[in-house]
Amino acid sequence: MISQCRNLNKTIQRLSFSSIPINNFKLHFFSTSSSTPKITNKKLKVTIKNKDKLDIPSNNFANNNEPSLKINYVGGEETNTTPSTSTSTSTSKSKPKQSSTTTSSSTTENNDFSNENNSSTFVSSHYKVNEESMLSYLDRKKLVYKIIGKQIIVKECPFCHDTKGKFDNFWKLYISRETAAFFCHRCGCKGSWIDLKVNLGDLSLDHSHNKSITKSSSSSLSSSSSSSSKSTSTPSKPNEIEEPTISIADLKKMLNYSNELNNHQDVIKKLTGKEKGERGLSKDVLEFYKVGVTSQQFFFNDEWQEHKCITFPWTTLDKKGNVQVHRCKLRSTKEKSLQRIEPKGGKWGFFGWHTIPLDAKEIILTEGEYDAMAVYQETGIPTISLPNGANSLPIALLPLLERFEKIYLWMDDDVPGMEGAAKFSEKLGIQRTFIVSTKQNDPNGPKDANDALLAGKDLKAILSTAANIPHDQICDFSDVRSIIHNELKDPLSVIGKQSKWFPSFNKILKGHRKGELTIFSGPTGIGKTSVLSQLSLDFCSQGTRTLWGSFELKVPRLARKMLSQFSNCNLDKHVENYQEIADNFSNMPMYFLRFFGSTQVDKVIDAMEYAVYVQDVEHIVLDNLQFMLGGQTKGIERYDIMDDSIEKLRKFASQKNVHITLVIHPRKQDIDQVLNINDIFGTAKATQEADNVIILQSSKNNYRYLDIKKNRFSGDLGIIPLSFEKETNRFSESIELNNNNLTTTNNNNNNNSNNNSNNNSNNNNNNNNNNNNNNNNNNNNNNNNNNNNINSDNSINQTISN
């Protein structure tokens, strides 16, 4: 009997890897010889158990060799379309490649949406997906569905083997209307919304940790494809990916930082004092959070300087409860802007994670380390600090926060802090996230928690006023009152990021703002990509997380151009400095789409959505619309698809609060003709939807200038004269252009326009009276155009003179 039961167990194990979901079918053995084996069959479902311990996955800090984002789709460059030979279904031929993302999907009434897989892309069970976008995607994939209660039920699961038309095989794929987590009751396939897109071939993820964007990733792709082709029932684990190793010497050095604090009374005074520039923290709290002291060299004021630094460790606890430090943030005591993360590479982490009790159900996340210690000191509630401030919440840290029922976000009470809070709240789950307002509607109130501590405010009382983000489509005046006051009091906080390389850009457009759509145009070969590359580097170097999508240049070629602009040197002549330049470039949060040529706009938006969720991207450059949509339609339909694409991109920029820069080529024009806003290819929808319209113009003598044609924020228009340095591919604001350089071209344009008017007038004299009215109107239009060109000449000449 026992041997028969063992054979039955083996049969069950074989069945568990087939399409029959019998994961919870159990066979129990009893030692008594008189009893027979007892078979119990719980509710049938498939669950892949995660035996790995939860740890902080690998990371790359924005300021420490952060790798480029590698997103690719079917039909794009370096795409592996070979389906997986996974044995998780009985017929692997029809099953798409298994996703390698991780979800902690929402648990429904039947628990079918729970998922414990461990992988590189984690989606919180509290994350909400827009239902409209889900239904739109299902329509796009031509999947028949119906909505019942909290579920979207799909008629035929695309991951199952042939249904053979049997009714019992239909309507087995369930998708949560809130989290978009899916589960098929027939084949057992499950995962997040990202997993669904990956498995359907619309999103291919590269989880390699290659730090150099110019280095070929073919090896990592081949290894990932080979691993996916193995006959396994579970996805590969992220811990199996090679991570940067940290030496034992570095670990010991970081552990000793906290012991050095008592040897530096000046630092203790700075941290515990309550005078101006001091922090007002208790010595016990400093020791509890393992704050330390070290020295570090920084390149500051054109020289290397030794700076005493306060250290803020990223910590974990080992099995025995001992504090483990795996990275440290170093901040100079003299200059706030001088910060560093050491060692390079390693893992993401939270400052103060070791202070969180295992049974804690609520937690406070602050923007800075001083704020975390101040909040804990006054409230006693477990508090940690984000590793990258308001810039980003690394997705690798989300699994650590999954167990908390309530999360308070105590960010700086300014525009960037509140924007970060709104973004992180969506990622963590709006229902369980509460936003703290430090100023409490007092325009002169403290900006952050540490300021509130020094001002003698009651931090417990402030915390008690925390509230969820209101419905995104409903608000009252109280929701915007403080926002308006902050804008009036501090205009610089809303005008956007300032350009360091183009000062006139700030004077005209005021800055680079989130949530806007910019249309960028200019003749072929004039240098649109070079200008946008330099502008994106300008903002990216200031912390703006940027995603570049070039559909006419492959990533290595685009990256080489950027490296020349970034280093301000000709790489061909400085090959010996390449590694150092590449290392410095890798420190910036710059990511790339690997699409090339014609690509459906929906696939591009899928990739953009992923980048915004995972990498907290704030600026997206798409170069250009004609290449992206090329060959998809013919005739008048191409205008329809252009309008549809622009509408989707406009909606994405507003909903995700990111700035999208979209390149659109103009209609064919004479080389010397000055382009107008109506010369941009397509219908008027592009320029109507855009917040900014910028045209790169060229004069007769090949002098180029940026022509700001639309500025919805302030209404200011004008030009920015440019000069180009071929050695470095860099543009700069020109100070050598004289009036004649631009005037000659514009006068020629005026003469051409006058000749056209005269020709039209002569034609009018030869036509009948009915046509005269129409031709006269044409003359008036031409005359108006002449006046506009003359006005443009005057503004150009005036700007050059200034």
Image (cartoon, grey):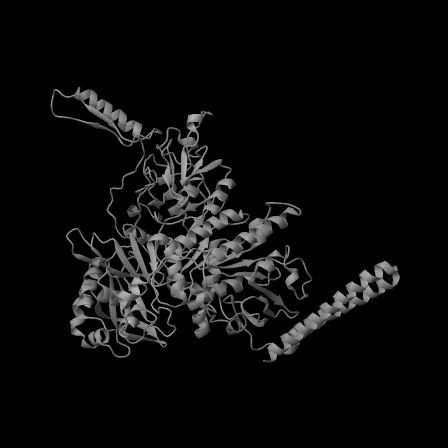
Q: How many marks?
A: 0
Q: Residue at x 30, y 60 (%)?
A: 365
Q: Residue at x 66, y 46 (%)?
A: 635
Residue 126 horizontal side relative to residue 688, left or right = left
> Quick check: 287 above or below 551?
below
Image quadrant for the N terminus? top left
Residue 275 horizontal side relative to residue 712, left or right = left
Residue 397 percent across, percent down from the top left: 31, 54
Residue 779 horizontal side relative to residue 205, left or right = right
Image quadrant for the C terminus? bottom right
Q: Quadrant of residue 345?
A: bottom left
Q: Residue at x 21, y 52 (%)?
A: 359
Q: Quadrant of residue 104?
A: top left
Query: Foreground residue, 368 or 340?
Result: 368
Query: Foreground residue, 303 or 13?
Result: 13
> Quick check: 128 above or below 14?
below
Q: Is residue 247 visible?
A: no
Query: Foreground residue, 562 or 630?
Result: 630
Residue 221 horizontal side relative to residue 76, left or right = left
Residue 749 percent across, percent down from the top left: 71, 69
Residue 287 percent across, percent down from the top left: 18, 66
Residue 336 percent across, percent down from the top left: 32, 73
Q: Is residue 250 visible?
A: yes
